Amino acid sequence: MRQIVLDTETTGLEPTEGHRIIEIGCVELLDRRLTRNNFHQYLRPDREIHQGAVQVHGITDEFLCDKPRFPDIAEDFIGYVRGAELIIHNAPFDVGFLNQELGLWREDAEPIDKLCRITDTLIMAKSLHPGQRNNLDALCKRYEVDNSQRDLHGALLDAKILADVYLAMSGGQVSLSLGAAHGGPGTGGARGGPHRLSGQRPPLVVVRAGAEELAAHQARLAAIGAASGGECLWLKTWTD
């Protein structure tokens, strides 16, 4: 399963007003693991950046004057994202700008939502936390994701932060190692082979979930199912 966490920075808020993308940042996940195979590019927009946008991301016209234009990197970008699931926070914003750039590059260019499946983490967050603030900073605080470096918005930095938030929102634990990496019990590693439980232990106390806990569990599985496109194994087992 290949997923690309994507963010953009732009000259302003509306592509219909001629605003353009000036930064693209992408972080790759393979089977929910960060690969470090990232994509990052600043772009020259051939127009002035709105002053309000500069205050958000800190990118200036002077900084971009020697950067490539979108057509210069379009094929590399498409080759990188094609066929992946794009994870985007407030996806209509970024998708609208990407589709504009693709259309300006080539009239027959496929829109990004035809090249990739789109998952909007803002929709996920609103489903999980209705009535609460669900911007990226609020989600970082809720899921204890470090965003201390985020003094200004930046496409690659925000994509990296969103990747951590998405993994926490969509299931938390990324891999099950059982301590193998550290030679822990049951691995036969540096700590001396399998760990055997004593036969003298008292019987384990079984505490069964109540109706409220079962309902909360099923709601959580439904959210994971929605985020994974119906591929939540636990939900399939729960409903069988």
Image (tube, rainbow, N blue to C red):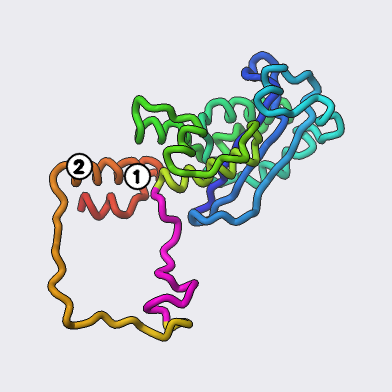
Q: Mark 2 points at which residue?
A: 215
Instruction: Give coordinates of residue 30: x percent, y percent.
Output: 53, 55
Instruction: Give coordinates of residue 137: x percent, y percent.
Output: 51, 33
Give the side of residue 205 with respect to residue 152, left or right.
left
**Please, is residue 162 above or below residue 131 in the view?**
below
In this orientation, does residue 103 appear? no
Q: Determine which quarter of the picture holds residue 233.
A: bottom left
Query: Would residue 147 be counted in the magenta stretch?
Result: no
Instruction: Give coordinates of residue 59: x percent, y percent.
Output: 74, 29
- Give residue 158's mark: none
> Residue at position x 30%, y 46% from top?
221
Disc 1/disc 2 C-alpha distance (Å)? 15 Å
Nearer to us in this view, 238 or 161: 161
| Amino acid type of the residue tagged 1 in the rendering | Gly
Q: Name the residue under label 1.
A: 225
User: What type of secondary structure mainly makes up the magenta span?
Assistant: loop
> Residue at position x 66%, y 42% from top?
78
Q: Please state the extent of the stretch shown in magenta in the rendering.
A: 171-187
